[in-house]
């Protein structure tokens, strides 16, 4: 005899974001999720307490870095890959333009931040130079500010030379490029970098911060902010 009970409703499993409030790579993904209105649970991974290096977290992300995104049991790592996945799996509203040349431009801006600036200034890099070269706070801060000046300088020059910035990094469309640019500025401000030489970058930053998706996901507004 057939079971007459109605089938269980199909429920999409919740998304889980492994995040730390000060992590700019996590902030990128928080912005992308907010832009797309995707509800998720946050799992807080405290970097100063080295929770990312625990066996439990390494089982989630063998690289021991945040963010990681669990979507229905599929764990995704690397913020750029996660954001592109979100745009493909949840296309509305898009955070990548449709045309190949435009997509390449948006990726270039994102990668100037994520590949050229961020790796030189992340936690493990700073910890290593402090210990290996016996740097004090002033030495570490000088390193940080040097690479911010070099990186944001080249980002500014690229935005100006490309002539494609409007309200945001790519015309008047909010894209993955903005998701990368804004968190980097938060980091630079935290290290008291002088940002006066990057007027285009800072104009885009200011416009983005008028949007709830950028504002509500900023580090200080996260439940794990201390
Ligand atoms: N390329 C990676 C970078 C991830 C990364 O470096 N995350 C930092 C926080 S922003 C981290 O987990 N740092 C821990 C450490 O350096 O030990 C991405 O975009 O997701």
Image (cartoon, rainbow, N blue to C red):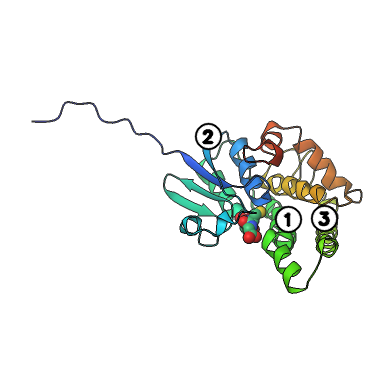
Looking at the rendered image, the quarter that the C terminus falls into is: top right
On screen, residue 171 above or below 123: above
- Where disc 3 sits, the SS reads helix
Q: Is residue 145 left or right of residue 13?
A: right
Whole-number angstrom distance, CA of label 3 to CA of label 2: 32 Å
Furthest residue in direction right, as rendered: 196
- Sequence order check: which comes first, mark 1 or mark 2? 2
- Where disc 1 sits, the SS reads helix
| Residue pictured at 14% horizontal, 29% vertical | 3
| Residue pictured at 62% horizontal, 41% vertical | 224
- Where residue 209 sits, quadrant-wise, is top right
Q: Is residue 201 left or right of residue 104?
A: right
Q: Which residue is mark 3?
A: 152
User: Quick one: 204 or 102, which is closer to the camera?
Assistant: 204
User: Quick one: 27 or 10, which is closer to the camera?
Assistant: 27
On screen, residue 54 above or below 205: below
- Say if mark 3 contacts mark 1, CB within 8 Å: no
On screen, residue 123 above or below 216: below
- Sequence order check: which comes first, mark 3 or mark 1? 1
As drawn, the label of residue 159 is none
Count the marks. 3
On screen, residue 157 above or below 225: below
Q: Position of residue 196 (x, y in %)?
A: 91, 48
| Residue pictured at 79% horizontal, 42% vertical | 205
| Residue pictured at 75% horizontal, 38% vertical | 208
Whole-number angstrom distance, CA of label 1 to CA of label 2: 26 Å
As drawn, the label of residue 39 is 2
Quick check: can you spot residue 174? no
Q: Which residue is mark 1?
A: 113
User: Quick one: 216 or 46, which is closer to the camera?
Assistant: 46
Q: Is residue 65 left or right of residue 151?
A: left
Q: Badge 2, how many Cα within 10 Å: few under 14, some, many 20+? A: few
């Amino acid at each position: 005899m057939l079971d007459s009970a109605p089938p269980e409703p199909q429920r999409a499993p919740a998304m889980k974001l492994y995040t730390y409030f000060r992590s700019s790579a996590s902030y990128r993904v928080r912005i992308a999720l907010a832009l797309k209105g995707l509800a998720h649970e946050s799992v807080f991974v405290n970097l100063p307490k080295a929770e990312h290096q625990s066996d439990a977290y390494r089982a989630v992300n063998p690289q021991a870095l945040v963010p990681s995104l669990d979507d229905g049991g599929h764990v995704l790592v690397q913020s750029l890959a996660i954001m592109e996945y979100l745009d493909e799996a949840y296309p509305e509203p898009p955070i990548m333009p449709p045309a190949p040349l435009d997509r390449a431009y948006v990726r270039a801006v994102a990668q100037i931040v994520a590949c050229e600036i961020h790796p030189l200034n992340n936690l493990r890099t700073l910890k290593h130079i402090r210990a290996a070269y016996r740097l004090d706070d002033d030495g570490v801060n000088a390193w940080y500010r040097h690479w911010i000046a070099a990186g944001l300088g080249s980002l500014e020059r690229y935005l100006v030379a490309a002539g494609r910035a409007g309200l945001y990094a790519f015309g008047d469309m909010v894209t993955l490029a903005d998701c990368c640019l804004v968190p980097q500025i938060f980091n630079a401000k935290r290290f008291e970098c002088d940002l006066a030489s990057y007027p285009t970058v800072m104009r885009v930053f200011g416009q983005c911060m008028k949007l709830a998706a950028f504002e509500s996901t900023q580090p200080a507004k996260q439940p794990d902010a201390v």
